[in-house]
Image (cartoon, rainbow, N blue to C red):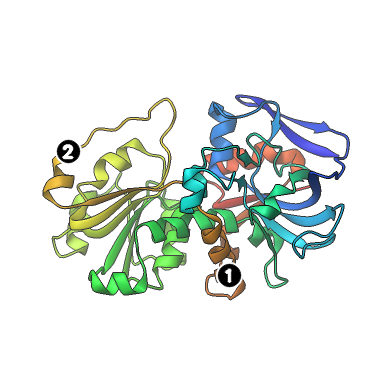
């Protein structure tokens, strides 16, 4: 079978490997589609301390069960499925809290310490069933859309962490949200929040991404290279600042500026990880204390968020298919990385 194997920074190779075989501890997925995540691109460009090299990257996996020794938890050969990429231990402190993304026990991560989805087939531990980390894909959801369920679940996790439910939004009089970063994650925030909040402000330095935001329903777009970001936010919010600010990119400058954009008693979330060579920022922390600002760090998602994401898409409450702008074959995975890195692709997919 063909697979894209990561050996080190800027070194990914298309190789022929033996077909994996199911056994008493693993089953086999025939990959139909694997989404390209910004994390994959960062690993490709900068490496990752937890990567077991060489490894097949890719964790946004949709496919069919190809080989399974016996029927497990109502799953059988031929079922279309999507995989939650982190298989937690289920026993540690954080797993018992339900925050499995912070598992400190023996856990597995597809595309990091286990081979991932940039391959024709992938071997997956049977423990994924025991941990509840696999879902059947309804016929109403395509494999391409299935590859977007994982990133959508991370956005849902952020909204759940920030308690941005319809009831809380009404109670806290939240009338506007500013999203910094109009990439695929930023657009997902836009799609979900448009159902709940009257005004969504999208901020980006890419004119193309801002135009895309308009197509998805943004009420206001701001390019901080051409406009006074804080001045525009104040103008749009009656001089108060934004009720909620979400930094949905990996920009140090965006995180530093964000505290000057949120109103008193507002909510601020840091969603994107900063580059490993620039992990620090500087800002006036007094504004957090004096303005009663709640700052949220957002990391990963839980299986509950994953299930909620699939239900939203399957029930047609959110349409994520227009996010997919570029499609690549497995042998062109590096081209997919470049398209995502340069911002040419809103979301790219790779298929065998």
Circle 1: element type: helix
In the image shown, does 222 or 174 lie closer to the viewer? 174
> What label sits on residue 102 in the rendered view?
none
Q: Using the numbered discs, state the Cα–Cα distance from disc 2 to disc 1 in whole angstroms.
A: 41 Å
Q: Residue 335: give x, y in percent of width and height.
A: 66, 39
Query: In terms of sequence position, does the residue under pointer 2 or pointer 1 come before the other?
Result: 2
> For the image shown, how many numbered marks are present on the structure?
2
From the image, which quarter does the N terminus lie in? top right
Q: Residue 28: give x, y in percent of width and height.
A: 81, 48
Residue 127's place in the image compared with 160, above or below, is: above
Given contact means CB atoms under 8 Å apart, are the residues at marks 2 and 1 in contact? no
Q: Residue 234: give x, y in percent of width and height.
A: 17, 58
In-image side of 276 versus 199 (left or right): right
In the image shown, does 246 or 107 lie closer to the viewer? 107
> What label sits on residue 311 in the rendered view?
1
Q: Mark 1 packing: few (<14 Cα in 10 Å), some, or many (20+)?
A: some
- Among the 4 quarters of the image, the one containing residue 238: bottom left
> What label sits on residue 284 in the rendered view?
2
**Image point 71% across, 44% down: which residue?**
117
Q: Residue 51: give x, y in percent of width and height.
A: 61, 29
- Among the 4 quarters of the image, the one containing residue 276: top left
């Amino acid at each position: 079978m063909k697979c894209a194997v990561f050996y080190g920074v800027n070194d990914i190779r298309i190789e022929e490997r033996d077909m994996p075989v199911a056994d008493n501890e693993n089953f086999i997925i025939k990959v139909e589609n694997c989404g390209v995540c910004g994390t994959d691109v960062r690993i490709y460009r900068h490496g990752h301390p937890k990567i077991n090299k060489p490894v097949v990257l890719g964790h946004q996996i949709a496919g069919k069960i190809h080989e399974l020794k016996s029927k497990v938890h109502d799953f059988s050969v031929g079922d279309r499925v999507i995989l939650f990429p982190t298989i937690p231990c289920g026993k540690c402190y954080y797993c018992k809290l339900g925050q499995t993304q912070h598992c400190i026990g023996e856990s597995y991560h597809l595309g990091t310490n286990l081979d991932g989805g940039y391959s024709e087939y992938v071997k997956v531990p049977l423990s994924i069933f025991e941990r509840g980390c696999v879902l059947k894909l309804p016929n109403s959801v395509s494999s391409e859309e299935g590859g977007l369920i994982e990133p959508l679940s991370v956005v849902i996790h952020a909204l759940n962490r920030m308690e941005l439910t319809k009831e809380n939004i009404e109670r806290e009089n939240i009338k506007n949200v500013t999203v910094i970063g109009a990439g695929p994650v930023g657009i997902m925030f836009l799609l979900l929040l448009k159902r709940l909040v009257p005004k969504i402000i999208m901020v980006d330095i890419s004119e193309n991404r801002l135009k895309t935001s308009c197509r998805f329903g943004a009420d206001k777009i701001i390019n901080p290279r051409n406009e006074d970001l804080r001045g525009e936010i104040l103008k749009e919010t009656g001089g108060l600042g934004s009720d909620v600010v979400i930094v949905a990119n990996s920009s140090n400058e965006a995180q530093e500026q964000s505290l000057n954009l949120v109103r008193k008693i507002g909510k601020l979330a840091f969603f994107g990880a900063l580059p490993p060579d620039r992990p620090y920022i500087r800002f006036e922390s007094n504004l957090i204390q004096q303005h009663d600002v709640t700052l949220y760090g957002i990391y990963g998602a839980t299986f509950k968020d994953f299930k909620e994401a699939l239900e939203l898409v399957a029930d047609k409450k959110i349409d994520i298919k227009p996010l997919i702008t570029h499609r690549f074959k497995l042998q062109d995975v590096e081209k997919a990385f470049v398209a995502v890195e340069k911002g040419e692709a809103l979301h790219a997919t790779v298929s065998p």
